[in-house]
Amino acid sequence: FGTMIYDPGYYNTAVCKSQITYIDGDQGILEYRGYSIEDLAANSSFVEVAYLLIFGSLPSSNQLNLWNSKIMNHTFIHENLIQLMKSFRYDAHPMGMLISSMSAMSTFYPEANPALKGADIYKNKALMNKQIFRILGKLPTIAACAYRHRIGRPYNNPTNTLSYTENFLYMLDRLSETNYKPHPVLTRALDKLFIIHADHELNCSTATMRQIASTLVDPYSAVAGAASALYGPLHGGANEAVLRMLEQIGSVENIPSFLEAVKQKKQRLMGFGHRVYKSYDPRAKILKEVTQEVFALLGKNPLMEIATELERHALTDRYFIDRQLYPNVDFYSGIIYKTMGFPTDMFPVLFSIPRAAGWLAHWVEELSDADLRIFRPRQIYLGKRGEKYIPLENRV
Ligand code: CMC
């Protein structure tokens, strides 16, 4: 232990070797399996990108059809899980419902539980794939049920003939049995949003996924843990926090006083800053384009003016320049979701659905890694030693 390094927040610690996602934080480059995020967002569907992340190459059209149908065949959730979701309070945060439901899923699929079946089950690729189909298939259904619960409407069943994102929007919005179909512009916008959120190497939730999975627990429990990490306002909860911040700022005139409070460290500028990107986040650029596509259909969101002005002020201010703080993926995503009609507390849920593809890619990679060991960091102990025990009656 003489060589132990103190590294709070893991600024400089690599805990795995990976071939999934490449980030160059200085150049603002993001690639999944070697493909640029710009190319993937422009040309692929989210389901195709999920295949790429998990299996390492772009699918042929036969592979894509099979992969898509396997996922879509697992979109229905168990009736008991529906009962569980219905037992939440009417105003339960949808993210709390998603985390709990995912955790509960570990009890529905004991075939994936090494505690019952033995750790060797993870040598079986077909069994692992089945859990992947289930998690990717059921997450949008759980998310849609959480949303319907929140707005006090009956849950909708999935429609497996629709695309992944189309079916998700359908489950959220469908009001009757008539031929309701989500708008193709919104479906494509959501698909792009899902693509750019799908993976981001060892962000906090993915590191959590790998840490939990290193114990060989079932993937449902690991995904529930990863989703809990994502829920925090410094990670995937930031999109929700950005929206609340923009609403709190209220108008462009209030921006200078708000930024003054940030500089005095009374609050953070949410949606700004990143551990790895020290230049413009490439995902924020794509998001700006998607914003325009959604605005062209639904009209401009008034919060956009505050957001663009806030960005302009921050990018020309010494405090932010010196610390290399730029807008991250969460800065504009919330405005798009809000314009599409999502309530603010659904935002981290909308982040979790696509990020599950990344979590699962890392799960597969980790379990096939010959170097895999249980994650067990060390500490630097600064507490007392050798204290003399005082019986309760003698303590003051
Ligand atoms: N507003 C104001 N100051 C900031 C911000 C911010 N958003 N982010 C960093 N700083 C300052 C920080 O106070 C520190 O200043 P000083 O050197 O004077 O102490 C300096 O910049 C370095 O910050 P840090 O906290 O050491 O950086 P980190 O790598 O530990 O944190 C972060 C990264 C993303 C948690 C942080 O930038 C932050 O809290 N941002 C706001 C929340 C946010 O938008 N999170 C989403 C991240 S991207 C997507 C995701 O992961 O989900």
Image (cartoon, grey):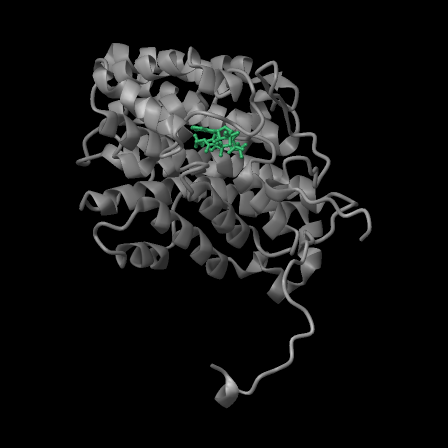
Image quarter of residue 33: top right
- In the picture shown, does residue 330 fall above or below 9? above
Image quarter of residue 338: top left
Residue in the picture at 68% in, 51% down: 377
Among all residues in the image, which is located at the extreme right? 2
**Position of 294 compared to 21: left or right?**
left
- In the picture shown, does residue 136 fall above or below 85? above
Residue 163 picture location, percent across and down: 40, 28
Residue 55 picture location, percent across and down: 64, 32
Among all residues in the image, which is located at the extreme front? 396
Residue in the picture at 39% in, 24% down: 331
- Count of residue discs: 0
**Position of 251 compared to 220: left or right?**
left
Among all residues in the image, which is located at the extreme bottom? 393
Residue 83 picture location, percent across and down: 30, 58
Instruction: In this rendered view, identify the residue nearer to me: 367 or 280.
Output: 280
Residue 345 picture location, percent across and down: 30, 39
Image quarter of residue 218: bottom right
- In the picture shown, does residue 106 fall above or below 237? below
Camera sees residue 386 = yes
Instruction: In this rendered view, identify the residue nearer to me: 185 or 293.
Output: 293
Camera sees residue 190 = no
Residue in the picture at 70% in, 30% down: 19
Instruction: In this rendered view, identify the residue nearer to me: 172 or 25.
Output: 25
